[in-house]
Amino acid sequence: MTQLAELFQPLTIGRMRVANRIMLPGMSAGMMLDEKARPTPEMIAYLVERAESRPGLMAVGASAVVPPLSPERQPVALYEDGAIPALATMVDAVHRHDTRFGIQLWDGGTQAGRNVQLSPSGVPALAAAVGDQSLGAPAVKALSLDEIADVVRFFAEAAVRCEKAGFDFDAKARGIETHVIGDAADVVTEDGGTVLSTIAQAYDRARAI
């Protein structure tokens, strides 16, 4: 193991000290949630069992920042304050094992697998939606500029809730590539700029929280 000695050494990322350089990345495994899409004791136990091996970093996979049009039990809800106590219980349980804990802020946009998918352009995703395929072809709702700004605000508000729950880092603010915010790159505003450029500063503020 001498060739991997550094793997087990602590490091500092910004102001965050990490016990070693091993990470269990954000995945959707173990998503045992209640009817309000909040972590259950079973989900917490699943994560604690993995934290017991003491990786330096762990993360929860894609977790929803945009309120759904109808109640959903998947994925983890980050869109309302009522979720904070259950999230905090989960974070505290993982922290007991000297593991830094993060979460992915996410909205699936045109790949969300819902009856109605959000898209700045109104163009459906080329990829198949991940979700209940029995729903059939989803309707694609084109967002206005104000609604796109709302999505950015949802990301920022979710980041605040995660901070209150005690998470150490945002594993990845998903939605910036092929999802809602990323889709905005091809939408031209009235002044000739792209939506992506108009929301860039607002998104930077969300990242700074």
Image: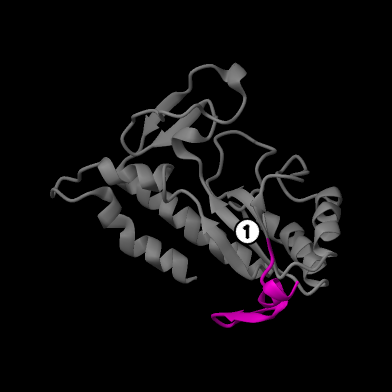
Write down the residue under mark 1. Answer: 103
Query: Looking at the image, which residue sits at the far left?
Result: 191
Res 19 seen here: no
Residue 160, picture quadrant: bottom right
Residue type pointed to by label 1:
Ile
Report helix, strand or loop for mark 1: strand
Camera-nearest residue between 13 and 184: 13
Please tell me how crowded label 1 is: few (under 14), some (14-19), or many (20+) other residues with Cα within 10 Å: many
Q: Is residue 91 above or below residue 78?
A: below
Q: Position of residue 142 (x, y in %)?
A: 35, 33
Q: Position of residue 44 (x, y in %)?
A: 82, 55
Residue 9 within the segment the image draws in magenta? yes
Q: Position of residue 59 (x, y in %)?
A: 67, 59
Residue 166, picture quadrant: bottom right
Camera-nearest residue between 148 and 172: 172
Camera-nearest residue between 84 and 179: 179
Q: Position of residue 39 (x, y in %)?
A: 76, 51
Is residue 31 left or right of 167 when viewed as pictured? right
Camera-nearest residue between 202 and 169: 169
Res 95 seen here: yes
Is residue 191 left or right of 78 when viewed as pictured? left
At x 64%, y 49%, the residue is 77
Q: Is residue 180 above or below residue 6?
A: above
What is the magenta range? 1-23
Number of disc labels: 1
Is residue 52 left or right of 69 when viewed as pictured? right
Residue 152, picture quadrant: bottom left
Residue 30 within the segment the image draws in magenta? no
At x 56%, y 39%, the residue is 68
At x 55%, y 44%, the residue is 67
Report the quarter where the N terminus lies: bottom right
